[in-house]
Amino acid sequence: MLVAGPAEGAPIVLLHGIPEGAEGWRTVLPRLGAAGYRAYAPDLPGYGFTRLPATADYSLAGAAELFAGWLSRERIAPTWVVGHDIGGAVAQILVVRHPHLVERLTISNAPVERSWPVTPVRVFRFVARLHLYAPAAALGLIPNPYAWWALRRGYANPVRLEADVARRVFWDSKVTDPRGRREFERHLAALDNVQTAEVATRLPEGKAPTLLLWGSKDVYLPWQTVGRRLQALLPRADVRLIEDAGHSPHLETPSAFVDALLTWKQSRTQNRSTQ
């Protein structure tokens, strides 16, 4: 887990997407810390430094329950939860099942209902369900040209995807460590959009102030379809589009991403104080 900011700062928890891991938030964390927040970026089950038994639940619902227990145990909740991609799906499950833990919610370029897995994830999930991901990664077959192409396609400006950063953010122990390979395989195999479909009908019940923060040039989970569907389910949510970003605005344009978070929070605070 990555942590930044003063110990007494208001908590904010950042949930990453696939296949990045907590490292995807490294450039965002110090900006939030400098703004006075205590920012946490944990690894989902199957990623980074989160290590679970082979019999554990590596699905998104399993991740939501894991984080719910952690938030309660560490007395971090109620907290601001920011979820990107499948981290946004975990956030949806968390806010539906454990609404008392979520003070405010930001969902960024995330799936809803059965709008996922996108094609590259579906391919890797198929390989994992055949128990072939770990051996393929061990043989150096992952990442491969298709995987690199899929990552670059997610950027509005592919030049921003630096190879060394990509290896650290997207691949890390998922290809370099025997246990990491096995755990990521379990995570891939456990992915199931039934879980997001089940909670979608209860999203309108949520009372936490919500921001939909989207890279407008996302080719995988476009605002025009997936984002607007989330907006329909969360009619009280505010919307901010980052025009110069694709699927991962926190990686492409971290300053704009953090600015959008902070200005939204400020506007919400001001609106409440004038009511």
Image: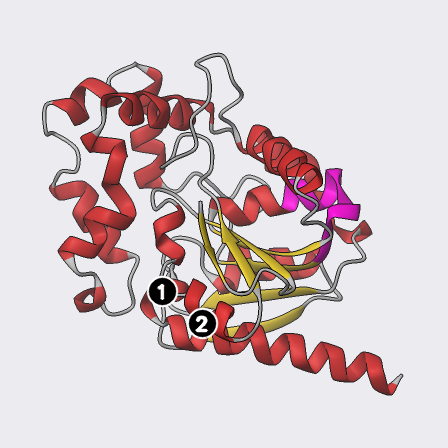
Answer whether labels 2 and 1 touch (C-beta < 8 Å).
Answer: yes
Would you call the spot at circle 1 few (<14 residues within 10 Å), some (14-19), or many (20 or more)?
some
Residue under the image location 35 percent in, 51 percent down: 23
Query: Split into 4 quadrants, where in the image is the N terminus?
Result: top left
247 vs 32: above or below: above
Numbered circle sitting on residue 47: none
Q: Secondary structure at mark 2?
A: helix
Would you call the spot at circle 2 few (<14 residues within 10 Å), some (14-19), or many (20 or more)?
some
Q: Nearer the viewer, residue 207 or 69?
A: 69
Tell me which secondary structure the magenta stretch mostly adopts: helix
Total count of labels: 2
Q: What amino acid is at disc 2?
A: Arg
Residue under the image location 63 percent in, 77 percent down: 264
Q: Secondary structure at mark 1?
A: loop
Q: Would you name the residue on which mark 2 appears?
A: 31
Residue 245 is drawn in which quadrant? bottom left
Residue range of the region highlighted in magenta in the rendering = 92-103
Instruction: Work out which residue is located at the far bottom of the displayed protein and give it.
Output: 274
Q: Nearer the viewer, residue 38 or 185?
A: 38
Q: CA distance from mark 2 to mark 1?
A: 7 Å
Return the x and y of residue 49 as percentages of the image width and height.
38, 35
- Colour approach in the figure: secondary structure
Q: Nearer the viewer, residue 231 or 240?
A: 240
Q: Would you name the residue on which mark 1 appears?
A: 27
Return the x and y of residue 209 as percentages of the image width and height.
73, 64
Q: What amino acid is at disc 1?
A: Thr
Direction from residue 171 to residue 218 in the image, left or right? right
